[in-house]
Image (cartoon, rainbow, N blue to C red):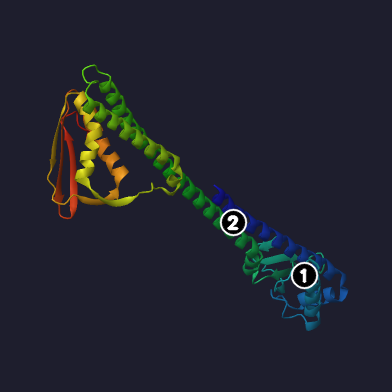
Amino acid sequence: IVLMIQVNWIFESAKIKEALFNEKANMVLSRTTEALGTDKETCRRIGEVIQMDKDTALAAKLGKREMHKIDSIFNHYMNFYNFHIDYTFEVVKPNPFVAKYVSGNTNNVYNKSLDEVVSKNGIELKLIFPEKKQFIAAEMGTLFITSVILILVVLVLFWQTIQSLLKEKKISEHTNDFLNNMTHEFKTPLTNIALATKMMTKDSTIQQADKIKHYSGIILEENKKLRLQVEQVLSMTALERGEIPLQKTELDFHQLTRNALKYISIQIEQQQGNLQLNLSAVNSLVVGDRIHLTNALCNLIDNAIKYSGNKPQLQIQTFNMNQYLVVEVSDKGIGIEKQF
């Protein structure tokens, strides 16, 4: 809308400039005609030429003195109105077979009748501006350049606004993803802590030192994971760059899997489920962030347990494909719909 208004303003300005040009041209022509009427000698000479020659073009029949007189009057009023443009003029008698032309202007030619000044023979004074269009264009130069600059500024500001909105949207999406992941990763340790505490309070196991040590270890480890998750939440400034900082080291993914199962297997045990472990990859070394890889694996196992119903049947297997390590977590639950 702003661009349309600006373009329309340019065209309207051009019309105003042309209207001002026409007004000045008609004023110059009118004042020149009035001044010519006070010069009795020039008027007399024009009258004589009319009587002697019926040709429509009278400028060639007039003497240099008369032409110079008319030109000097034109030049005076052009300067008076601060109208600096090249011009020519003619003194003509319209063709009698053509309808009499009413005083006015057509394109770059401006006419004024000399009937009241010289005689009643329909003599006209024509003021011609060969470079009218160029003059108006030059007058519009500053306005046009200013308008173009303004249009470019509007386009740049619009582009920057769109970029800013897209950046804000991207940050918002990263934040939502981060919070969703954190929510899931908070729930898993809390669930394991709750289950370990519940198992420790059972009368049948409370006296077994190895069980107490096992469940206490789970609680301590899950508490440590919660503390690390809190530290990640506190480092939310990384989201402004659209990334989460990673501490990459060389890891044995098989060992990482066994460590993760120590703490999440309590959920399978509590639901009387079964986990089949098939770590058959020859090369299980990877480079990655221990915490995030552990969380990713725990999330997969946690979802497998959550959507398997009673007595979950899970399988974790690894194998090598070219230079890659492939990890699969499968269950016999409700599955995931195709659109997800």
**Residue 88 place in picture, x, y as percent:** 70, 74
Residue extending furthest top?
203
Q: Nearer the viewer, residue 107 or 3?
A: 3
The amino acid pointed to by label 1 is: Met
Asked where in the image residue 338 lies, by quadrant, the reply is top left
**Up/down of 245 relative to 107, above or below:** above
Q: How many marks?
A: 2
Where 275 falls versus 197 (above or below)? Answer: below
Neighbor class of circle 2 (other Cα within 10 Å; few <14, some 14-19, many 20+) is some
Q: Is any part of residue 20 visible from this angle? A: yes
Please state which amino acid type lies under the numbered disc 2: Leu
Residue 60 percent across, percent down from the top left: 72, 80
Compared with 31, 247 (above or below) is above
Kindly identify which residue carries mark 2.
Answer: 150
Q: Is residue 1 rendered to the left or right of residue 302?
A: right
**Residue 331 x %, y %:** 17, 32
Q: Which residue is mark 1?
A: 78
Q: Quadrant of residue 302?
A: top left
